[in-house]
Image (cartoon, grey):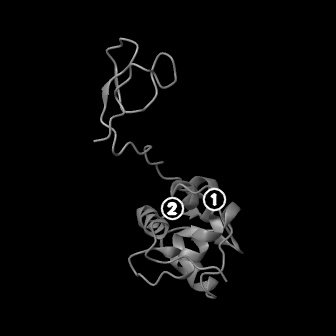
Amino acid sequence: MFTVSPNSAFARRVYALVRAIPPGRVATYGDIATMAGHRGAARAVGNVMRGCDDKSVPCHRVIGAGGAVGGYGGWPGLKRQLLAAEGIVVRGLRIKDFAAIRWTGVRPRPRTRGLRPLRACCSSDQVRAWPDCFRCSRRCARDSRTERA
């Protein structure tokens, strides 16, 4: 079985995202993986959740694709009870009105750490933190904006 270290950067991002899910809302493993910057890593999110023993992380709010409740460490009844306590209706093994209570969060902005926003190239007055030029959409020879801070 593959496990993800609980101290890895990916696991810390997953924990932070799961803590951000508001009560009465749910997110899928795939949603959390996408928000953490690793689209398609739903199983890795499941492995992180399996190893989580931090009570401040509401693991019961992370569910399977399509509204499937999932296992919850062998205690699916407990997961249903915790979701019901937050007002989420579970019918059988699926969440009722899944689309209405699905939380997709806010995708974080792209990282620009280490780049100073300076004047754009091509004699433009626009300021931008990206390494490409506004006008020519490529790295411009006159563009000195990407100097490392």
Q: Which residue is labeled 1 in the image? A: 98
- The residue shown at (34%, 19%) is 126
Q: Position of residue 26 (x, y in %)?
A: 54, 63
**Image coords of residue 127 (percent x, y):** 32, 24
Residue found at the far front of this picture: 141
Q: Secondary structure at mark 1?
A: helix
Q: Which amino acid does the dot numbered 2 rest on?
A: Arg
**Kind of residue indicated by mark 1:** Phe
Residue contact at pointers 2 and 1, CB within 8 angstroms:
no
Q: Which of the 4 quarters of the picture holds residue 134?
A: top left
Q: For the residue carrying disc 2, how many other residues have a C-alpha within 10 Å: few (<14), some (14-19), or many (20+)?
A: some
The answer to whether residue 66 of the structure is visible from this angle is yes
The answer to which of 88 and 63 lies nearer the viewer is: 63
Residue located 60% across and 73% down the image: 46
Q: Is residue 6 left or right of residue 117?
A: right
The x and y percentages for residue 86 are 48, 70
Q: Earlier in the sequence, mark 2 or mark 1?
A: 2
Residue drawn at 38 percent across, 23 percent down: 143
Please tell me the numbered disc located at residue 25: 2
